[in-house]
Image (tube, rainbow, N blue to C red):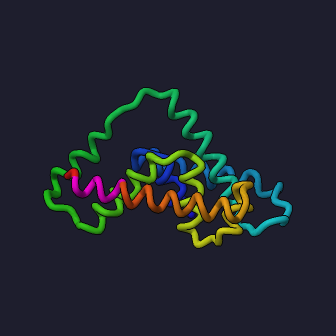
Amino acid sequence: MINKLSRMYTNSEEDQQDLVQEIIYQVWRSFSQFRGESKIGTWIYRVGLNTALLHVQKQKKRVDTVEIKDQMHVSEKGNTNLEQEQFDAFYREVKKLSKMERAVIFLFMEGQSHQEIGENLGITEANARVRLHRIKNKLKSNLKGETHGS
């Protein structure tokens, strides 16, 4: 869960690893505040999401750079595995979503029900269902456009 969350909110492998460590540290640091009013996974998700959002705000203040290593890796490999390309394309499109949309799709990927998604995000179950449907359609459309555009 933490790895998926960090991948959705970072642009490089190094940032992803940093965010994973930061989330784990924040979970450990704030564990004494866990009151047991929700599932432990839900609480970890909330701590992780808050940490990721703070990370995004910090990143906006930094100058954007191009990850040279990633570009070199692709050119060195030549033909990459189709599954990995699809996986990477999916995450590229997820990163284009709003923060709320990323949170909804993440919770869905973690197997949470519409009701649980709604409870975690402070929206109704019906609203969670509608948002998820729209996000799925948006991702499908964008991914089809990416494959046709290449």
Residue 143: x percent and y percent?
33, 57
For the point 60% across and 61% down, which residue is it? Answer: 130
For the point 20% across and 52% down, which residue is it? Answer: 150
Q: Is residue 118 left or right of residue 139?
A: right
- In the image, is residue 15 above or below residue 84? above
Magenta segment includes 56:
no
Note whether residue 3 is visible: no
- In the image, is residue 140 above or below residue 59? below
Note whether residue 60 is visible: yes
Give, as a single range, the part of the protein colored magenta.
142-148
Residue 34: x percent and y percent?
81, 59
Identify which residue, 30 or 144, lies in the foreground.
144
Residue 88: x percent and y percent?
34, 57
For the point 31% across and 63% down, which residue is it? Answer: 86
The single residue placed furthest to the left in the displayed view is 78
> In which quadrant is the N terminus drawn?
bottom right
- In the image, is residue 115 above or below residue 127? below
Number of labels in the image equals 0
Identify which residue, 100 or 1, lies in the foreground.
100
Instruction: Look at the magenta stretch and give its main secondary structure.
Output: helix
For the point 51% across and 58% down, which residue is it? Answer: 134
Q: Is residue 141 left or right of residue 20?
A: left
| Image quadrant where residue 84 sits | bottom left
Identify which residue, 129 or 24, lies in the foreground.
129
